[in-house]
Amino acid sequence: MPITTRAAVVESGGAPFTLSDVTLDDPGPHEAVVRLVATGLCHTDLGVASGGLPFPLPGVLGHEGAGVVEAVGSAVTGVSPGDHVVLSFTSCGNCRNCDGGHPAYCATWLPLNLLGGRRADGSSTLSRDGEPLGGHFFGQSSFAERALVDERSLVRVDPDVPLESIAPLGCGVQTGVGAVWNVLKPATGSTIVVLGAGAVGLSAVMAAALTPATTIVAVDRVGERLALAEELGATHTVDAAAEDLGAALAEITGGRGADGVVETTGNVTVLRQGVDALAARGTVVVVGAPPFGSEVSLDVNGLLGGKQVVGLTLGDAETQSFIPALVRLVKEGRLPLHRLISTYPFADIDQAVRDMGAGKAIKPVLTF
């Protein structure tokens, strides 16, 4: 039987979130119904809600859900009713990258997660008053009290860990952590620079603090976030509003440059500065997403020292192993994710959006 649930609907690009009753389709063979306990709010949600991406609206967004499984489709084997789950991105499971353990680079990632608003077969997972809504966002559309979730978006987690404390693992946190662990893989004595101290950047700082890197530099324009970065493991900070970034990084590294840089701001000028700050054979991981079509100018001769510029989606994580490992670190206090989280009742989603936009909240988490 279809289920009616309360959801935050975006009616059109730039419109606020509006609480509305919507209907979930019956779960397909590889889908589950999840009762949401918490869901993170991410800049990607805000970008789509603003009309910046061609996701079909009106629709339901949300892609950092955490909850309890209520029902499963006939072919679901990985979870059962009553299981606690974190929701992440979906993927086809059959293409070369999925088979190779890199589902974030699935051949059908964009339509399945970010742009399509429908299942792979074109059918809708959500409707309102008989009319289809944009849904299936990251295989979940978790800005709702209940969600119809693709099996490949589901990750079973330790039920002893409060779900509101781990909801952001599905996107922002695994992105920042994965940039360090899965791409940079710091060697002993490495220097890691993180450009931007938002949720993704601070996750990268925490991840770097769990590696053999000995110099961890956080860069931002907000003093409170730089202070928090120091508490989370940064050995140095740079206030980009008051200091020349290139000169500051040269001084910190003794002129050698950084072994790894994580660029989270989406600002192409900052990206160029990050590339210029690399040591020979250093790597910049590009995480921040500027508007489609944005380009950056690079000094080609400057790259010939073995520098690498690597794009990244969702930490290049294989979620079924990566997310449970992060949950364990949260549980043991080694990944203090609670320092980033501000909680809001689901009905206060627009206040959470305002606080996030004003920089008052690093990682808003909506609770149900």
Image (spheres, grey):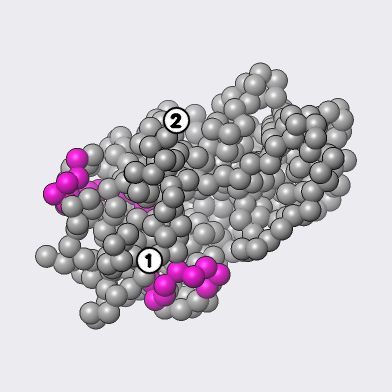
Residue reaching furthest to the front: 96
Q: Which of marks 2 and 1 is nearer the N terminus?
A: 1
| Magenta run includes residue 28 | no
Q: Quadrant of the C terminus?
A: bottom left
Quadrant location, the N terminus: bottom left
Q: Can residue 17 be seen in this view?
A: yes
Instruction: Please tell me which residue is depicted at 64% across the width and 46% down the height of the picture.
Output: 286
Amino acid beneath label 1 = Gly
Specify the principal SS of the magenta part. loop
Position in image of residue 13 (x %, y %): 50, 76
- Where residue 318 sits, quadrant-wise, is top left
Q: Which residue is drawn at 70% across and 24% down?
A: 190
Mark 2 surroundings: few (<14), some (14-19) or many (≥20) residues within 10 A: some
Depth check, front residue: 356 or 105: 105
The magenta stretch is 51-77
From the viewer's perspective, tell me whether residue 8 is left or right of residue 289. left
Judge by depth and name the residue closer to the eye, 344 or 118.
118
Amino acid beneath label 2? Leu
Q: What element carries label 2?
A: helix
Q: In which quarter of the image is residue 3?
A: bottom left
Q: Mark 1 points at which residue?
A: 117
Left/right of residue 285 with respect to residue 136 in the rendered view: right
**Mark 2 sits on what residue?**
329
